[in-house]
Image (cartoon, rainbow, N blue to C red):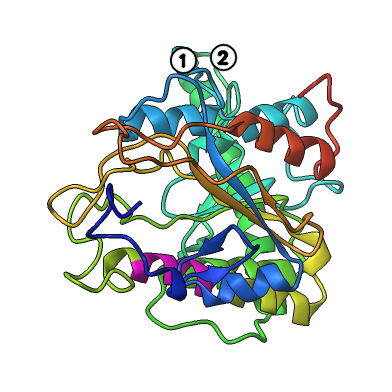
Amino acid sequence: LSAVRPNLMLPESSVLKLTDKTGIHPAMDGLSKLYKEGMMAVVQSVGYPNQNRSHFRSTDIWMSASDAKEYESSGWVGRYFDGNHSTYPAGYPNNNFPDPLAITISSFVSETCQGAVNNFSYALTARTSVKLVEETIAGPSDNTCYSSEVDFVRTTIKQSNAYAANILSAFDKGKNVATYPSNNNLANQLKTVANLIAGGLRTKIYVVSIGGFDTHANQVQIGEPTVGNHANLLKSISDAVSSFMADMKSLGYSEKVVGMTFSEFGRQIRSNNSLGTDHGTAAPLILFGSCVNANVYGNNPQITSSIAPQEGVPMQYDFRSVYASLLIDWLGVPAAQV
């Protein structure tokens, strides 16, 4: 490794050991403890065949679960909801499903939750972003396209208000008991998720996000590979996830949640001359929660000094096999349907 990443390689003594052969960055102490508590799994070298190194296209592939040369207009979570809620949004919310089926902690809904016709996600950034919209009185129907479109908008407003009322109620009933790090946007998002879960919201899917990992330059500080932008990003994830799980455990919900990370691609094995790395292929993926089978799955990549200049970590696991495990073992979808 010293021959291909001389300016980035971590000193072996600094790595936090998960197993005798595998460890994680020293900035990820929170996740190291979570692993030792049996609440985290690592899947090595996750990707897909014929990796596309475009941010946009590869993100589409991960969100839609398509092949590299296949174009899907729906997300894998959206298709899961299509199978269980085929009439949505007609008749929603209802007594059996009073809350949003999915929530994206963002100003925009996640493409992951896009169904064949509708997006199943409700978008919010914080309690203050949840608004009730004034509902208008329906005028006479004249059976024109304008009338049907206005009816659609009116129905959407009514449904959004019903969801918003339940979300606001959950915010008020819920609480956080764990301490979350300050100046950590991902932690703030997960704190909101924990608050809503504790408030009794029965939403199944939450989507949160963190950016900044496109570290073509200044991934580390010169001569100090354990610190820098990459270390700060990894610490943000580690601190956010460990705080969230501490919250869930204290509130009694740790066996009701499973979290999964994903990114559009990993980084190339060889570092560049700008103290960074360029777009690669496969990468590690983590899952967390009291019910995960805590382990490191897969073998460490075999890296030699003769590795090609733009070579990425080869895939061991297709990302769709991870999705399939979650759908079957957590969401109860029949294997044949998956």
Neighbourhood count class around disc 2 (C-alpha, 10 Å): few under 14, some 14–19, many 20 upward = few
Tell me which secondary structure the magenta stretch mostly adopts. Answer: helix
- In the rendered image, residue 47, in percent from the top left (x then y), is placed at 51, 33
Q: Quadrant of residue 25?
A: bottom left
Q: Nearer the viewer, residue 169 or 315?
A: 315
Q: Nearer the viewer, residue 132 or 41?
A: 41
Q: Is residue 230 above or below residue 322?
A: below
Report whether 72 appears left or right of 271. right
Tell me where residue 142 appears, x and y as whole percent. Answer: 55, 17
x and y, in percent, of residue 89 in the image: 67, 33
Quadrant containing the C terminus in the rendered view: top right
- Residue at the spot of label 1: 71
Q: Residue at point 64% right, 63% down?
A: 20
Residue 65 makes an appearance in the image: yes
x then y, percent, for residue 104: 53, 51
Q: Which mark is residue 143?
A: 2
* The residue stretch that appears in magenta: 231-239
Asked whether 232 falls inside the magenta stretch, the response is yes
Residue 154 visible from this viewpoint = no
Magenta stretch: residue 59 in it?
no
Judge left or right: residue 221 versus residue 244. Answer: left
Distance in Å between CA atoms under marks 1 and 2: 36 Å
- Foreground mark, 1 or 2? 1
Task: Give the total number of marks visible in the rendering.
Answer: 2
Residue 185: quarter of image: bottom left
Q: Earlier in the sequence, mark 1 or mark 2?
A: 1
Residue type for callout 1: Tyr
